[in-house]
Image (spheres, rainbow, N blue to C red):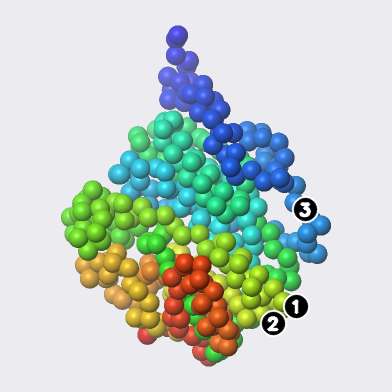
Amino acid sequence: MKQKAYARAGVDIDLGNRVKATLPQLLARTRRREVLGKVGGFGGLFALDVRKYRQPVLVSSVDGVGTKLKIAFAMDRHDTIGADLVNHCVNDIAVLGAEPLFFLDYLGTAKLEPRVFTDIVRGFARACAENRCALIGGETAQMPGFYRAGEYDLSGTIVGVVEKSRMLNGAKTVRAGDVLIGLASSGLHTNGYSLARRIFFDRMKLKPTSYVAELQNTLGAELLRVHVSYGPLIQALLRKFNGAARAAGACPIRAFAHITGGGFVDNLPRILPRYCDAVIRQGSWELLPIFQLLAAKGGVPPDELYQVFNMGIGMVAVVAADRAAAVLKFIRARRHKAWCIGEVVKGRARTRIQ
């Protein structure tokens, strides 16, 4: 059969349609009863059951996974990167107390590769199912001449919901004397990869396939560890400790900070009142080997490390001091590593690394 003109120009619509035809089966596990219609329409439909809320507030976020994609390309492994994106977005709305409702994705590439597409979508679907989040639509764009061969870009949009009276707002609730509890990350998550690649590949002359004794793993596999989703744990914590409180201001769990781009230095001030500082105690948690290696070999000042990387802490909970031990016990009982890593003191909405 003669190839169509658009396909000769680099955009194979028929291939795209064949690949997209596999979506219903791949996404079936993410479906929720509120979803209307099928994937593939002009818009995704979700019928929120407003009877469950007095004043429902929709919470949205959009993000990507940055140059972690370069590691996926180099390793030719694409089954984790979709989960990274979903989990990152879940965490961003979880810090406001929101539970996820639905997710939409964007994939742009020079040429659609069915195997790669399927692996990415499987990652989306797995993470959406684990977070009880419906994947209701997306966009796949074939853009020859725009992307390098074999490369692509991803972004995702999530929408969740929270009862207005239960929204977390650290600027109003955090106070001096509160305790900072750090929840362990799995590694770099989705931030700091441009600097990490410079250190590992340019400075240390390693390759993604290099076995690194300190990591007991290949560098590429270590860098592709999936971003942890803290969403289900946060919802469990809020039900357990904040459920009986009438308003967020009376709740023992004051706030959460997702430690993403900007590290501790830039993310903790986002949840602080203007008259409080967050003090982070170095050495109060287990520093993952990959961060030990970055610190030892990177030639990066310590203060900057804490502004670029999560340094082994992916989420920080701000908790009333008299409930900190109970919260820590609850987290650890659910097989999440966590530590008391600092406290809130009087200040000017800054992070202090000590």
Per the rendering, the mark at residue 246 is 1
The tag on residue 275 is none
Q: How many residues crowd around disc 3 within 10 Å: few (fewer than 14), some, or many (20 or more)?
A: few
- On screen, residue 142 above or below 33: above
Kindly give the residue lying farthest to the left in the view shown.
205
The residue where tag 3 is placed is: 49
Cβ–Cβ below 8 Å for labels 2 and 1?
yes
Please name whichever residue, 63 or 237, is drawn nearer the observer in this view of the structure: 237
Which residue is pictured at 61% across the width and 67% down the height? 236
Place of residue 317 in the rendered image (x, y in percent of width and height, measured from the top left): 53, 75
Q: Residue at x 54, y 30 (%)?
A: 22
Q: Amino acid at mark 2?
A: Ala
Residue behind mark 2: 250
Q: Residue at x 51, y 21 (%)?
A: 14
Does residue 348 appear in this view?
no
| Precedes in sequence: disc 3 or disc 2 | 3
